């Protein structure tokens, strides 16, 4: 492998990590506040992809603009789903079986809704610029991937700012770390949970909408990405945006460089293999590794 | 204009009943907390003291009875509505957010929209009271020492501009010197006009500091009166002070 190949793979990995982070933070915030593993995440990603397509085809929005517009739409969908379904779940400090079943069922419903509305053929978003590339010296960058990365990374940074510098963000983190303490200072946990669910689903929709500019999709869209989101969350821990960003980068690097030794068709096997390895070797994620190294030092 | 001989207490708890599922913990608990006083509830582990405070703040639903704050029945309001009325709880075990900075922990005490405008001013007041917290403001709360954590929890409670401050075992697990320090702070806070409801296993301290005391045993108030008289009550001394 030449140095240029290496640089190209590295850049491709970083660009991929951006979109991986977007699709994982949504699951993370929902898990953090509600301890719900959102198995329906892939279904909401699929909805986001189709919404972006509709906005692109009917209103002729730029695909990136359409993706950003999908965010508030899906956030409202998320809040509605929270009030209709999620808030009836029993409250718990751990994931419960009813919550897993509800989210799994919701995913199936969303998928079939997708088949009813949009049919089962593969769709995609093409613009005259879809195959444009930027030449940065010897490195070749697909333009659309750069835009997708910029939009995704920008939104993740905005989320980090929201969590750190707003009252809503502080309340969200407070419920993640100690729900009881949040209640006694007067955090309305139902309200924060509904907004968090909206935020998480908004990010799912955004991820789907951004991915729709890169890949074709059908109502089953999102399934392989759900598995990747699990890997990233296990790697990065379930609590912090920075953890998710690191997890996304690790997975993207492993997947990108695995191509050197393995056919591209094995990509998903690589992420699943990584999940198994991490669960056995490093069940606490990267944060525990850093902690262990610090204790040794 | 007629002056009423006895002004109504700030907090009046009447025949309070509370339960975890099928297990009833409080069996008709009644007591009063007059304005400006330190009132204490003493009793052993599992008597229902913490449950009483959790029911007053609203985290625990009441099954019967009334909670009157300034004459208003707040017993069915959600916790945030009670915090808005300037009731504040410093819980047993402190319950800080370990991976948030000390300052963010304090600021969360002023989470209610009506409190946010003055949050910075109140933060300065808390830092004046606990200069140590100002030094450690950006440190994660989980890395503070036990005493600093207790100050942080107390400071968080003060950020809500409480009229009634409920303290649950503020001295638990602290070195004797720190216990003195914390209780000195509590007296100082009371002198500034904050009414205090203190729950403590450190019975002699609690009785020394307070004006009125209630003894709670297995979910019932079994004895009450001026703290001085409880401190010399033969039963209290034998069961709760002598053994310490």
Image (cartoon, coloured by chain):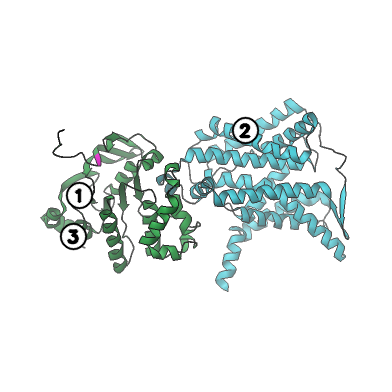
Chain colours: A cyan, B green
Residue pointed to by mark 3: B241
For discs 2 and 1, the disc positioned in front in the rendered view:
2
Where residue B140 sits: x, y (%)? 49, 61
CA neighbours of label 1 inside 10 A, class few (<14), some (14 to 19), many (20+):
many
Marks 1 and 3 belong to one chain: yes
Please name the residue that numbered disc 2 is placed on.
A77
Give whichever of A105, B53 is nearer the camera.
B53
Chain for numbered disc 1: B
Mark 1 and mark 2 in contact (Cβ < 8 Å)?
Answer: no
Label 3 packing within 10 angstroms: few (<14), some (14-19), many (20+): some
**SS type, badge 1:** strand
Q: CA distance from mark 3 to mark 2?
A: 60 Å
The picture places residue A40, in percent across and down from the top left corner, at 64, 38
Q: Where on the picture, by quarter, is residue A100?
A: top right
Dot in front, 3 or 2? 2
Q: Where A287 falls versus A91 (above or below)?
A: below
Tell which residue pokes out farthest to the bottom in this image.
A297
């Amino acid at each position: 492998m030449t140095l240029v190949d290496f640089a190209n793979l590295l850049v491709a990995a970083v660009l991929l990590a951006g979109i991986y982070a977007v699709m994982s933070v949504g699951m993370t915030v929902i898990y953090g506040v509600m301890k719900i593993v959102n198995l329906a995440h892939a279904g909401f990603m699929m909805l986001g992809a189709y919404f972006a397509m509709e906005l692109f085809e009917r209103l002729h929005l730029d695909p990136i603009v359409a993706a950003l517009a999908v965010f508030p739409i899906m956030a409202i969908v998320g809040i509605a789903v929270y009030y209709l379904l999620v808030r009836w779940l029993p409250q718990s400090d751990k994931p419960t079986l009813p919550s897993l079943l509800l989210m799994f069922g919701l995913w199936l419903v969303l998928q079939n809704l997708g088949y009813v509305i949009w049919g089962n053929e593969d769709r995609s978003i093409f613009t005259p610029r879809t195959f444009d590339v930027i030449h940065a010296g010897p490195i070749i960058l697909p333009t659309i991937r750069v835009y997708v990365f910029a939009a995704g990374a920008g939104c993740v940074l905005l989320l980090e700012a929201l969590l750190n510098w707003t009252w809503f963000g502080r309340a969200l983190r407070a419920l993640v770390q100690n729900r009881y303490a949040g209640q006694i200072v007067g955090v309305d946990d139902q309200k924060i949970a509904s907004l968090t669910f909206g935020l998480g689903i908004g990010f799912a929709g955004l991820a789907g909408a951004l991915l729709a500019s890169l890949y074709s999709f059908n109502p089953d869209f999102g399934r392989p990405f759900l598995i990747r989101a699990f890997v990233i969350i296990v790697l990065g821990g379930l609590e912090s945006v920075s953890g998710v960003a690191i997890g996304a980068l690790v997975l993207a690097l492993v997947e990108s460089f695995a191509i050197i030794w393995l056919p591209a068709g094995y990509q998903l096997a690589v992420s699943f293999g990584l999940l198994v390895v991490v669960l056995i070797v490093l069940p606490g994620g990267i944060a525990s590794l850093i902690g262990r190294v610090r204790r040794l030092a | 204009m007629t002056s009423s001989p006895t002004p109504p207490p700030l907090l009046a708890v009447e025949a309070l009943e509370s339960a975890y599922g099928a297990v009833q913990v409080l069996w008709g608990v009644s007591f009063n907390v007059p304005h400006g006083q330190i009132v204490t509830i003493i009793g052993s582990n599992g008597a229902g003291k913490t449950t009483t405070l959790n029911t007053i703040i609203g985290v625990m639903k009441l099954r019967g009875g009334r909670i009157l704050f300034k004459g208003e029945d707040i017993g069915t309001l959600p916790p945030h509505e009670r915090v808005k009325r300037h009731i504040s709880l410093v819980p047993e075990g402190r319950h800080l957010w370990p991976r948030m900075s000390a300052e963010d922990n304090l600021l969360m005490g002023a989470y209610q929209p009506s409190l946010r405008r003055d949050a910075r001013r109140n933060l300065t007041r808390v830092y004046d009271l606990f200069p140590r917290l100002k030094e450690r403001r950006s440190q994660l709360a989980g890395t503070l020492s036990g005493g600093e954590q207790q100050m942080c929890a107390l400071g968080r409670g003060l950020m809500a501009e409480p009229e009634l401050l409920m303290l649950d075992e503020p001295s638990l697990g602290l070195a004797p010197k720190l216990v003195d320090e914390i209780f000195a702070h509590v007296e100082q806070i009371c002198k500034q006009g904050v009414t205090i409801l203190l729950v403590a296993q450190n019975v002699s301290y609690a009785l020394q500091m307070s004006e009125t005391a209630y003894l709670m045993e297995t979910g019932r108030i079994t004895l009450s009166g001026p703290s001085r008289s409880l401190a010399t009550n033969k039963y209290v001394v034998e069961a709760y002070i002598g053994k310490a």
